[in-house]
Image (cartoon, rainbow, N blue to C red):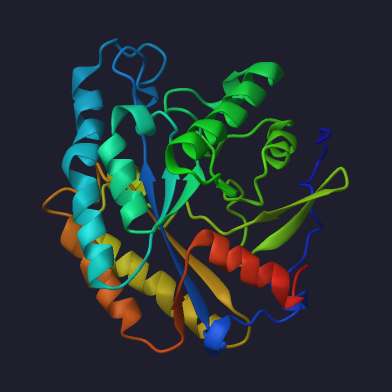
Amino acid sequence: MKPQKYGPFPYTPITQRPKITWPGGAQLALWIIPNVEFFPLDEIVPVRGPSAPVPDVPSWSQRDYGARIGIFRIMEVLNRHGIKGTVTLNSEVCDAYPYVVEEIMRLDWEIMGHNQSNSRLLNGLEPEAERELILGALARIEEFTGKRPTGWLGSGLQETWNTLDYLIEGGIRYVADWTNDDQPYLMNVDGKQITSIPYSREINDIPQFEVHMRTPEEFDQLIRRQFDTLYREGAESGRVMAICIHPFLIGLPHRIECLNSALEYITGHDGVWCATGSEIIEHYLASGQTF
């Protein structure tokens, strides 16, 4: 898209929109997003900044724990509640952790594109390199799984002025980088359409555990409070609640129970639709309630 002062969508206040209804009259679409990522040992782990050492064994090992152990704890908890995850997948996970991808496929979870690795962000690339990264990531996931992703989350939620064009070119139908709403909305990218889905930088274990230093009990309460408000508002027009998690954080032994506790609370309410990203977007687009 061309550089512009506002996003490729109109400003539409929540009070001036068509009513969204979810299947079965649900008030809230619950969307669980495990981020399954790979950090090459021979590259900088970005969390430590550009001067980080290579190899950065402590940072790398922390993240590798997620693929070795943490993701399987998440799978067990989601299975306990009958919830399918929507995985944001670095395409290099297919080569580094193929068993994890096979288990994701066995569970019939959805897979979204999520760059090639989490060490290379889109906003640090020249246009042609960015295009090659996006299309290459989608192609590798399709080659391994037999199914091309229709959703995308950029590593670090980063984009350039060209990202949406390349995503549309690659067959992506929805993107989660724009965390500015509690409902899906349409984007017009120079006459081409893509849909934004509500992701979260708040109900997300990275900022809560690594920045704000929340305890597992505090994160559980944050999730519940988020749910209570969105559930109440969803009685007027359906809302999406994203819970964004990383296996190397929420998958630790002393944290995993807070995810189970929060999901027990949420799924104990009527009118909650546990959905994948594509299910949410397909229903939204088919409903005629778009804006």
The location of residue 156, given as percent across then percent down, is 49, 36
Q: Is residue 220 left or right of residue 108?
A: left
Quadrant location, the N terminus: top right
Image quadrant in which you'd find residue 210:
top left
Q: Is residue 47 left or right of residue 129?
A: left
Count of marks, rendered view? 0
The location of residue 46, given as percent across then percent down, is 39, 23
Q: Residue at x 45, y 32 (%)?
A: 91
Q: Residue at x 64, y 64 (%)?
A: 184
Q: Is any part of residue 156 visible from this angle?
A: no
Viewer-proximal residue, 189 or 258? 189
Q: Is residue 149 left or right of residue 30?
A: right
Q: Is any part of residue 230 visible from this angle?
A: yes
- Relative to 90, residue 239 above or below: below
- Relative to 229, residue 160 above or below: above
The location of residue 86, given as percent across then percent down, is 43, 55
- Relative to 218, residue 6 above or below: above
The location of residue 275, given as percent across then percent down, is 47, 69
Image quadrant in which you'd find residue 64:
top left
Quadrant location, the C terminus: bottom right
Q: Residue at x 36, y 33 (%)?
A: 93
Q: Residue at x 42, y 23 (%)?
A: 119
Viewer-proximal residue, 107 or 263? 107
Residue furthest out toward the right: 191
